[in-house]
Amino acid sequence: MDARKLGFPYRAVLTGASGGIGAAIARQLAPRCALLILVGRRLDALEALRQELQPCAVHLVCGDLSEPDTLARIESVARGLGGINLLVNNAGVSDFHAFASQSPEVIGQLLATNLLAPMLLTRRLIPLLAAAPAAQIVNVGSVFGQIGFPGFAAYCAAKAGLAGFTQALRRELADSSVEVRHFAPRATRTPINSAAVSAMNRALGTAEDTPQQVAAALLRFLEATAWQRTLGAKERFFVLLNKLLPALPDQAIRGQLPIIRKYLPK
């Protein structure tokens, strides 16, 4: 299947556009777009990005995706502009913390932003996507949605839920014109990571990508046909190992616990 059959040129909604990975995706996606709707929580960052992306037809929706009004405004803008053929659910938040002492409010925010918001936005936009001759929904997950890791229990739960939602919806829409796909970055150098997480990654020797590398990989994914992609050969190996022989990752991660606990917030 060629790129045009997957909806190229794109009429896209991109969430999390004011963040590191989101802005990088916007820069690489814009030349392939007839229309780009950027969604984020920081208007100044969105406005600066729109100026940078000229002459692409860029429209902005600033708001919190956990608020129904924000979802309604995204739908209204997309409908008013004549519809879309690509939704990239990229927005996400993280919190590195021992689960037993993590606040219920933060746990709720992690689930609301990383799982419930993309589900509800997708539900609103499916009619517009289905009206296009070919369309894509791409849910940006994480390798932590496939390998549970200490300090990220709620985040891992949300991203695992997003992966499950993607697979189920892909099967539900299998006889439609809408492709539903899952893209999972590994550790990435963005402000979503606290200083403690960055220090822990260095201590553990965790490989990290730049936002530009992640964006380039996502663009290649958009124009291919596989329904899922996890970045990093080593990470893909451990995902497979985690499925087939989970006791081995259990043992390896247990050995890392002293280092992980060194960086957990007190």
Image (cartoon, rainbow, N blue to C red):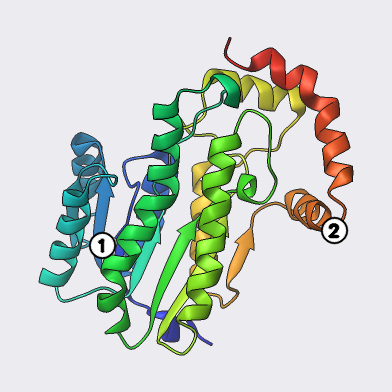
Instruction: Examine the image and state in which quarter residue 184 appears.
Output: bottom right
Q: Position of residue 115 (x, y in %)?
A: 44, 50
Residue at the spot 54% in from the left edge and 39% down from the top edge: 155
The vertical placement of 57 against 194, above or below, is below
Mark 2 crowd level (few <14, some 14–19, many ≥20, 10 Å Cα):
few
Q: Which amino acid does label 1 sit on?
A: Leu
Residue at the spot 64% in from the left edge and 19% down from the top edge: 199
Q: Mark 1 points at which residue?
A: 36
Q: From mark 2 to mark 1, how far is it between C-alphas?
A: 41 Å
The vertical placement of 220 against 96, above or below, is below
Given this view, does label 2 or label 1 mark the residue nearer the observer? 2
Q: Position of residue 81 (x, y in %)?
A: 13, 71
Which structural element holds mark 2? helix
Rendered-image quadrant of the C terminus: top right
Q: Where is residue 232 in the image (x, y as percent from the top left)?
A: 70, 51
Q: Where is residue 105 in the image (x, y as percent from the top left)?
A: 39, 28
Viewed as shown, does residue 265 lie left or right of 262? left
Q: Can residue 33 be seen in this view?
A: yes
Q: Which amino acid does label 2 sit on?
A: Leu
Residue 144 vs residue 7, the one in the foreground: 144
Q: Can residue 98 be seen in this view?
A: no
Which structural element holds mark 1? strand
Q: Name the residue under label 2.
A: 244
Whether residues under marks 2 and 1 lie with C-beta atoms below 8 angstroms apart, the answer is: no
Sequence order check: which comes first, mark 2 or mark 1? Answer: 1
Viewed as shown, does residue 253 lie left or right of 187? right
Residue 101 vs residue 234, the one in the foreground: 101
Give the farthest residue toward the top: 266
Residue at the spot 28% in from the left edge and 47% down from the top edge: 65
Residue at the spot 75% in from the left edge and 53% down from the top edge: 239
The vertical placement of 3 against 47, above or below, is below
Instruction: Examine the image and state in which quarter residue 71 appears.
Output: bottom left
